[in-house]
Image: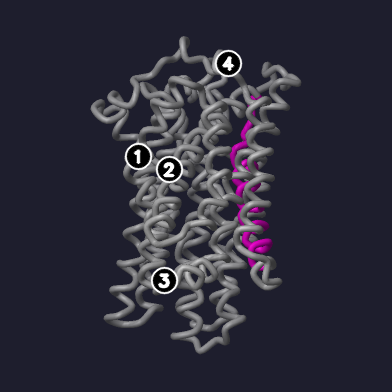
């Protein structure tokens, strides 16, 4: 890495822009989450009706998420990320103004499209900027997302507690995020910096038909599914496990999720430096094993303090898995970075949908603690699949971060 030129002013501005886009993406949907009860009550919906409306958000990503790849190839990852991010932020007030169930579900469906496309485009652009820096920065970008998500959730909870009308809250937040996206649009790297002519890739059709491309993407997606099972467990089952199996109070029951998110953010903040030092495979494998051991120990001890500590260590362990998986998907030879990222993101979302019902079915047949044994098994699966993060092709000689510094990834 000694021959790598220092980042230029353009590179630094682009890094600031992509950090802003990660922050906007983290804040957009998470601004809604604390206001769902108010939206339900304002429209007179049942819990089932609210739940089905919310399901429109991930459904949109599953239906059209992979279309992000061709869009990125045509317009450039930075411009797509900024413009679609702006559109998603502008949709926030429309969610608040929905007059009924269909309008709410429709607004959330559109928001789901913008979220999926922004997710793919901002990760692709982040990898492009990382390539120009010559060292890992992707973990720090995901840390920015986590911080923004937590901040937006806290702001939404405060607005709800103070009785701020939903439309006022979401209009103000949406306006700030629109302006941020517009500023980022001016600072991202233009399409001519994307190296598309140097490394055109196979396109989305090639991604789906060439086994040499499909096999590594499936391995990376499998890693993301395993990591997603660990990430989702604290949110979906942490409080239920502490309440039902361990008899904890409401406040203590919410601490596994808080502990997990806090340590995951810290892990992402430190992840780039560690990745540059020891490489993505070692970071991912060690972290996944830490998560597996911590969660097995927590379930065996069956105490609230052990559960909180177990999820805290698990958050630290899996912190880098998603960022490194996106980086690996964007560097698969024979595919454009945007297409690889869109495909693995689509498959990872499928994993998020299937894991909670599996745990729930086991919990109904036995106990929540028994169902949660699926989670350390998933962490072990992530440790096995960590080898999929090994740099490939021209990236193999690029050093621990795995970025193909000799030739920018085509996005």
Give the CA distance from mark 3 to mark 4: 49 Å
Q: Secondary structure at mark 2?
A: helix
Please tell me how crowded label 3 is: few (under 14), some (14-19), or many (20+) other residues with Cα within 10 Å. some
Which residue is labeled 1 in the image? Answer: 64
Please tell me how crowded label 4 is: few (under 14), some (14-19), or many (20+) other residues with Cα within 10 Å. some
The residue segment tinted magenta is: 133-157
Q: Nearer the viewer, residue 101 or 289?
A: 101
Which residue is labeled 4 in the image? Answer: 193
Give the CA distance from mark 2 to mark 3: 24 Å
Q: Does 159 appear in magenta?
A: no
- Going 41% across and 67% down the picture, which residue do you hit? 50
Q: Which label was assigned to residue 45?
A: 3
Q: Secondary structure at mark 3?
A: loop
Please tell me how crowded label 1 is: few (under 14), some (14-19), or many (20+) other residues with Cα within 10 Å. some
**N-term mark: 2 or 3:** 3
Q: Does 150 appear in magenta?
A: yes
């Amino acid at each position: 890495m000694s021959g790598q030129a220092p980042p230029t002013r353009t590179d630094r501005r682009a890094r600031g822009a992509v950090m802003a886009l990660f922050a906007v993406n983290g804040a957009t949907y998470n601004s809604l989450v604390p206001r769902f009860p108010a939206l339900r009550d304002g429209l007179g919906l049942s819990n089932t009706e609210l739940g089905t409306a919310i399901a429109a958000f991930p459904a949109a990503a599953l239906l059209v998420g992979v279309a992000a790849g061709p869009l990125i190839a045509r317009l450039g990852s930075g411009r797509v990320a900024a413009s679609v991010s702006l559109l998603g932020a502008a949709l926030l007030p429309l969610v608040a103004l929905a007059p009924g169930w269909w309008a709410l579900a429709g607004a959330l469906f559109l928001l789901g499209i913008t979220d999926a496309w922004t997710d793919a485009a901002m990760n692709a652009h982040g990898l492009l900027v990382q390539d120009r820096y010559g060292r890992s920065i992707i973990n720090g970008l995901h840390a920015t997302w986590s911080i923004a998500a937590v901040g937006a959730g806290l702001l939404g909870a405060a607005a709800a507690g103070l009785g701020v009308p939903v439309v006022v809250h979401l209009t103000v937040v949406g306006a700030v995020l629109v302006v941020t996206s517009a500023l980022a649009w001016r600072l991202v790297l233009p399409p001519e910096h994307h190296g598309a002519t140097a490394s055109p890739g196979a396109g989305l059709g090639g991604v789906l038909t060439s086994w040499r491309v499909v096999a590594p993407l499936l391995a990376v997606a499998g890693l993301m599914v395993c990591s997603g099972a660990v990430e989702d467990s604290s949110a979906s089952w942490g409080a239920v496990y502490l309440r039902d199996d361990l008899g904890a109070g409401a406040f203590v029951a919410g601490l596994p999720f808080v502990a997990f998110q806090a340590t995951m953010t810290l892990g992402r903040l430190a992840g780039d430096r560690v990745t540059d030092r020891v490489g993505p495979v070692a970071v991912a494998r060690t972290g996944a094993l830490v998560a597996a051991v911590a969660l097995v120990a927590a379930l065996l001890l069956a105490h609230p303090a052990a559960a909180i500590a177990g999820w805290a260590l698990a958050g630290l362990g899996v912190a880098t898995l998603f960022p490194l998986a996106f980086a690996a998907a964007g560097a698969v030879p024979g595919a454009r970075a945007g297409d690889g990222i869109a495909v693995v993101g689509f498959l990872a979302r499928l994993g998020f949908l299937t894991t909670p019902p599996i745990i729930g079915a086991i919990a109904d047949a036995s106990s929540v603690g028994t169902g949660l044994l699926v989670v350390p098994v998933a962490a072990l699966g992530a440790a096995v699949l960590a080898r999929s993060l090994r740099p490939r092709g021209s990236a193999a000689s690029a050093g621990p971060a795995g970025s193909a510094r000799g030739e920018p990834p085509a996005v």
